Amino acid sequence: MRTDEPKYRLIKDKIAERINSGELPVHSRVPSESELIADCHVSSITVRAAMKDLLREGLIYRIRGKGSFVAERKIESNVSADRMCGLVFANEGDVNNEIIRTLSDLLYSDEYYPITCFDQAELEGSSIVKGLSEKGVSRFIVDGKSPMLDKYIEQFPENASLTFIHRYETDRDYIPNANYVLSDYRKGGYLAMEHLLGAGCSEIAVVSCQVRSEIHPLLDTFEGCREAAVDQGIQFDRHVHFVENNDWGGLEGALTDMIKDKGVDGIFVTADCYAVSAFGAAGRLGLKIPEDLKIIGYFDTAWVNSFAVPLTSVSIREAELAGAAAGLMKTGALGKRLNIEPELVVRQSTVAREVVKSMPG
């Protein structure tokens, strides 16, 4: 093994060799990040870079909360272009990785070959869409996140079969023959607000670290919150307070002030990770969760179990999104639009432990 290679590549090649030799069989667990750090004497950044490359090459897949596993590679390298499908995503992360893993499993099961590409910094200056098209790929499942979407939308070949998944963050018109499998963010906002109001909250903060006017799903989420409040006879502009803070570091302080000034007793964070600040604000003020303050997150990611009190969260149902998108791609459907309704997963951040235990399912 060459020692002048970057460390992350040496680790990646070593794992790939174990996979290709059969030492690590299909669906077996790949050594964890902590194991690789200890065995290879490298940093977590180096290990993550190696794992990212393995994921991109389709050698591994991830299961939230369990780790990385060897992917099933059924298609040989001489696979024909009509059996390839480009999976074009803005970045990695809990939500995207779950969608990609499910898509890959479904496509492999029908002998399609998914090629996953991320619009990340190292790819700037080259077009991942053009690169796939030059390989003859004409089927694409695309994460409709801005600004990636606007950058690539004109670069798909005219004969491309396009299915946009999860979101469509652009002011452009819908493409007539493209498919859309989108999460219903308005419904998600409605479910979160309805639950907090039903739990007895009278002053509610809706929290984001992004400006809602710039993000289409946020606009839909906030509109869903408004609809739920109106349906329950609540004066929305008086009792629902928006916290839009681009400085994540300052979010905890902003929430602390709002809880004191407005008497906030319910918080809806538009991503689970923002709940760190909500729990921090509660700690500063000596508030108990859920007795004094109820908190709901969004996306139902691994974050939900990282807090002292498990987080109630809205799930976008990644498996259902992926299943619908893969089905449309494989059948050759054109111009279909599907909205996948989210669901609220109730945990102890909004209801007492004994109530959660007594709930069905």
Image (spheres, rainbow, N blue to C red):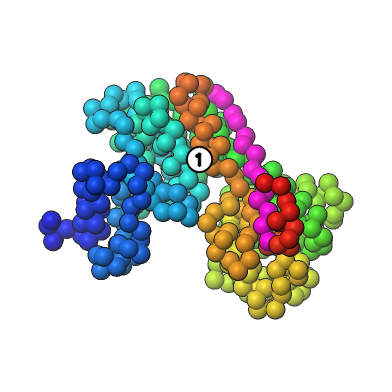
Report the quarter where the N terminus lies.
bottom left
Q: Nearer the viewer, residue 124 or 186?
A: 186
Q: Quadrant of residue 78?
A: top left
Q: What residue is shown at x 26% (from left), y 65% (from top)? A: 39
Please report the bounds of the magenta region as a residue range.
Answer: 335-348
* Residue position for label 1: 144
**Of 347 and 163, which appears nearest the observer?**
347
Q: Position of 45 compared to 140: left or right? A: left
- Residue 344's place in the image compared with 330, above or below, is below
The front one of 172 and 283 is 283
- Where residue 24 appears, as percent x and y from the top left, is 28, 47
Query: Is the residue 315 above or below the residue 326 in the image?
Result: below
Give the SS element for disc 1: strand
Front residue (pair 66, 334) = 66
Residue at point 69% right, 43% down?
187
* Quadrant in which residue 2 is drawn: bottom left
Identity of the residue drawn at 64% across and 43% down: 342
120 part of magenta stretch: no
- Left or right of residue 129: residue 78: left
- Badge count: 1
Residue depicted at 63% across the width and 57% down the height: 297
Residue 175 visible in the snapshot: no
Q: Is residue 277 above or below residue 212?
A: below
Specify whether residue 340 is painted magenta: yes
Q: In the figure, 214 relative to 281: above or below?
A: above
Q: For residue 15, say whether it is visible.
A: yes
Residue 345 percent location from the top left of the image: 65, 51
The percent position of residue 335, horizontal first and vertical second, equals 55, 23
Q: Residue furthest right?
A: 233
Q: Position of residue 152 (x, y in %)?
A: 42, 38
Question: Label 1 is placed on what type of residue?
Answer: Gly
